[in-house]
Amino acid sequence: MTALTYALGVLLFVVGVAASIGLHELGHLLPGKLFDVKITQYFVGFGRTLWSRRRGETEYGVKAVPLGGYVKLVGMLPPGPGSDKHTVRSSHTGMFSQLMSDARAAEYELVDEGDEERLFYRLTWWKKIVIMASGVLTNLVIAFVLFAVVFMGHGVATATTTVQDVSQCVVAVTTANVDRPVRPCTAKDPVAPAKAAGIRPGDRIVSFNGHPVHRWSDLQREIRGNEAGAAAIGVVRDGTRITLHTSTTVSTRPDLNDPARITRSGFLGVSPTVVNARQGPGYVVQTMASGTWATVQALASMPVKIYHVGRAALGLEKRDVTGPMSVVGAGRVAGELSSAKELSPSDRFFSVVLLIAGLNLFLGMFNLVPLPPLDGGPIATTLYEAARRGVARLRHKPDPGFVDSAKLLPVTYVMAAVILLASIVLIYADIVAPVSLS
């Protein structure tokens, strides 16, 4: 059963990734068609073509490597300076000039008689922005919708003030055992304050030392701040409110803000009952906002993180579970989530959905990086072109014309090589030194 649920989780993730890629490219295709740009190809994946079919002037298909997709918008590269808009200069003086000349020649092989006004570069600036940004926007919308489905429909695991378990003794937490199950009690271990007070599983804690308790986080702060002081704990048991008395003790516990750090604080010895609580739209917006900022920070530190992933793949250091991973690693995580015995079937399913939502948020933000071949490259070029033409109009200068985006082809190839190399490192690391939830 575990192998089956693992496979189903991986399959759900793969389908989710493929659908996300397809919808991202559809985000480019639909406005491109709307603005009458000539579009010759719409493909999900790269490499060898597995299936394709032509509808009108556009070929739709699926390729063997599902690591991306593309829409071929004809006319992304304008004619070279001084060239007739219908032809391409054949002369070149160096390697980069040859590169640009060959790229233009390949681009204009797709231009037939009558297509001149349907080329991408001839669109007004705002239409270019709409076409290029719609793919990013699609990923962000997918992320928002999936987050909303999970948080508003299924709910978020929320700790309540109802007691699930009562510790029998006080066992100190150290950096060595912070991630391990609590060891059994011994005769030398002191009795936990909650046990001494007579707290039972099912009791609902409503006050601590006279202070009302509405949330588990309120109770945690009260207990930790009480250190080794006396504690009067108000609980509701079988519909009756009673007050129990004990004294908390000081013990080493994970810090609330940084679980990897160990601090000394008050300890009672109760754990909460966790339930799925449905959230409102504000929670979804807050999650998107915090996730966006976290993604920006992750992208800024990505080169360093990939360096450490490479070291982990070579066995030189331990793999950081919070570091980047490839779709291979994410698929493995999806399999582990879907087969986790401690989760209910619905929690397993929605955990994978959350993984797909997070992936879409990352893809949307990653594609906004203002470098080709990412969507942010043409967006940045178009905004620069619009600004340059606007300044020229204000200064009553001649129109400077279209920005020659072909000059960015060396950057495109370098970035493509960097992305490919990073993908290889991550995939290899996810095979030999995978991130595991267990």
Image (cartoon, rainbow, N blue to C red):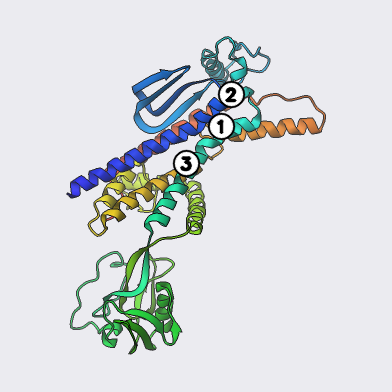
Instruction: Please state which of residues 195 and 26 is positioned toward the viewer in this rendering.
Output: 26
Secondary structure of the residue carrying tag 1 is helix
Q: Which residue is mark 2?
A: 120
Q: Residue at x 39, y 68 (%)?
A: 261
Q: Is residue 302 left or right of residue 383?
A: left
**Type of amino acid under label 1:** Ile
Task: Report x, y in % for residue 22.
Answer: 42, 33
Q: Secondary structure at mark 3?
A: helix
Q: Residue at x 53, y 15 (%)?
A: 102
According to the image, label 3 marks what residue?
Answer: 139
* Residue type beneath disc 3: Asn
Q: Which is nearer the eye, 369 or 426?
A: 369
Pinpoint residue 37: horizontal percent, then vertical percent.
Answer: 56, 22
Query: Against 395, is 155 above or below?
Result: below
Q: Position of residue 436 (x, y in %)?
A: 28, 52
> In the image, is residue 287 above or below residue 174?
above
Judging by the rendered image, the residue that carries numbered circle 1 is: 131
Residue type at numbered disc 2: Phe
Query: Furthest residue to the right?
Result: 396
The answer to whether residue 362 is visible is no
- Is residue 238 shown above or below 17? below
In contact (CB < 8 Å): disc 1 and disc 2? yes
Kindly report the distance in space between the C-alpha atoms of the residues bearing marks 1 and 3.
14 Å
